[in-house]
Amino acid sequence: MKIEDVYIWDINAKWLGISPFQLMENAGAGVARAIEENFGKGLKVAIFCGTGNNGGDGFVVARHLSFENDVTVFLVGDEIKIRSEEARHNWELLKKLDFVKIKILKDSSQIKVLNLEGYDVIVDALLGAGTKGEPREPIRSAIEKINEYSGKAKIVSVDLPSGYPSKVQVKCDFAVTFQWDKEEFEGFERIVAKIGYPKELYHLVGPGDAKFALKKKGEHKGQNGRLLIIGGSEDYFGAPYLAAKAASYIVDLVYLVMPEYSAKRITDPDMILRPVEGKNFTREHLEEVLALVEKVDAVIIGPGIGLKDETKEFVREFVKRCEKPLVIDADGLKAIAEDLSVLNGKTFVLTPHAGEFKTLFGGKPEGSLQEKAELVIEKAKEIGGVILLKGVYDIISDGKVWKYNKTGNKGMTTGGTGDVLAGIVGALLALGNSSLGAASVGAFLNGLAGDWVKEEKGENYTALEVARKVPYVVKWVLEF
Ligand SMILES: NC(=O)C1=CN([C@@H]2O[C@H](COP(=O)(O)OP(=O)(O)OC[C@H]3O[C@@H](n4cnc5c(N)ncnc54)[C@H](O)[C@@H]3O)[C@@H](O)[C@H]2O)[C@H](O)CC1
Ligand SMILES: [K+]
């Protein structure tokens, strides 16, 4: 788990209903407990706090330790800069306490003359996961001041040593980090304090994941993803259209490649049509369609493409030669089911429902969520890519980890919501996300859009309404 995961977990925890106040309280309590367990009670403690949530944790440590220890809090910076609600709440609370001494140090000159002789423990709650770049003043002087007492007082860092990993960092006896150890950490002792996260947060996809997936945005046209969608046949034009419509809200450019016979049915300016001769895809179209792949960042193949033998052959040949990340959906899945070796060396997401999963892998996932996940992990590992198994709970795996998505509702069985899902997954791939991220967040956004349409219209709605809900869901996620 990386430091970035902290923010995804915090947002998903908030979405589940775990408040940042609870997390901060548990964080501070964990640090206080580690200090008393290691150094006893009746301690003279100096707690250096920054103005972010790392400092917020420090305020909680102060309150907990003040019960049986002599605590002085040094706020480094101006208290008006304490921005989060939970940090501000704990700061205001601290100022009401009479046994806790508070000193506000706004600039380095005040810090440089500090004498910390006689303190048993110094707590470093200056900087944590929100550190950007080398420590700036006055935090920098505080780090240097603390380090003057390394070896004389016990030094405990909150979450991570302030300044880490730059050369100006607190030399702590240990850091108390939260919920799990971080793989980037090295060179200092850690104690892990749980802060109340349920196990679900390892697997459940939420707005935290979506926020990161949607943030991958360049600033110039075309940098925000270019997507190619290959689908449609003499019988179907709606499926590729739905995928293109949904994707058009997320990426800059959507190219829709369809047989001209069905392409002429589409007049939507939100996508760029690239019709090919005839009624169905065949090998004759291979070179022409492969040439389009150069200009895009990701490809979706399958929606409404049909099951004619020459079309399935086209799909397999295309997949074999496509060098961009791929979503293979719907009829495309049936085409590659006949020869999964076409996936070798590819970056891809398969988006089967249970029936298509059985066609691909011979068995239907049964049993508990965990048991189904085991099968999806095993098959994803076998084929070396990501499987998004659609269901009441969507299950996603890259063969190493597994995620599940709970958004969506029975109304989603209406034709075409799978095409909308493929469009969103392809768009997220085109934005530069990993296959796992694109698939899991795609499932989340698609289901949420469906839930919002259901709230308005009940269970009977069309897939196009789900596609049209995508921009609202994206807005909600980015503001969450
Ligand atoms: N889920 C959890 O693990 C929880 C962790 N908690 C604590 O929250 C901090 C992260 O808090 P955040 O507000 O995002 O950032 P920081 O407090 O680490 O720092 C931001 C603060 O510092 C200023 N700043 C940033 N970089 C620098 C710099 N190079 N020099 C000087 N100042 C800098 C910035 O302006 C802000 O004011 C995490 O570490 C945990 O301790 C939650 O409390 C509970 C859940
Ligand atoms: K710290």
Image: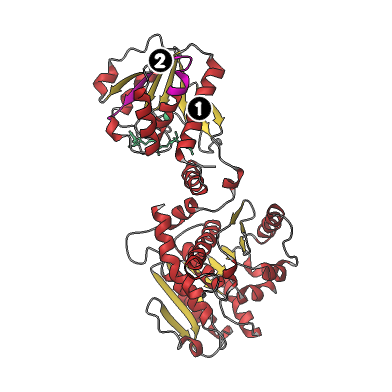
- The residue that label 2 is drawn on is 149
- Identify which residue is drawn at 56% across, 57% down: 436
In space, the residues marked 1 and 2 are separated at their CA atoms by 24 Å
Query: Does the magenta-highlighted stretch encompass residue 302?
Result: no
Q: Position of residue 139 (x, y in %)?
A: 32, 28
Q: Quick one: label 1, few (<14), some, or many (20+) residues within 10 Å?
A: many
Mark 2, residues whose alpha carbon is within 10 Å: few (<14), some, or many (≥20)? Answer: some
Query: Nearer the N terminus, badge 1 or badge 2?
Result: 1
> Which structural element holds mark 1?
helix
Specify the amino acid type for callout 1. Answer: Ala
Tag in front: 1 or 2: 1
Quarter-of-image position of residue 254: bottom left
Q: Which residues are magenta?
A: 63-78
Q: Quarter of the picture for ligand 2? A: top left
Q: Position of residue 327 (x, y in %)?
A: 55, 68
Where in the figure is residue 129, as x and y percent of width and height?
43, 37
- Name the residue tied to disc 1: 29
Q: Is residue 377 above or below residue 421?
A: above
Instruction: State left or right for residue 342 relative to residue 286.
Output: right
Name which residue type carries label 2: Tyr
How is the rendered protein coloured? secondary structure
Tell me, yes or no, whether the two marked residues, 1 and 2, touch with CB atoms within 8 Å: no
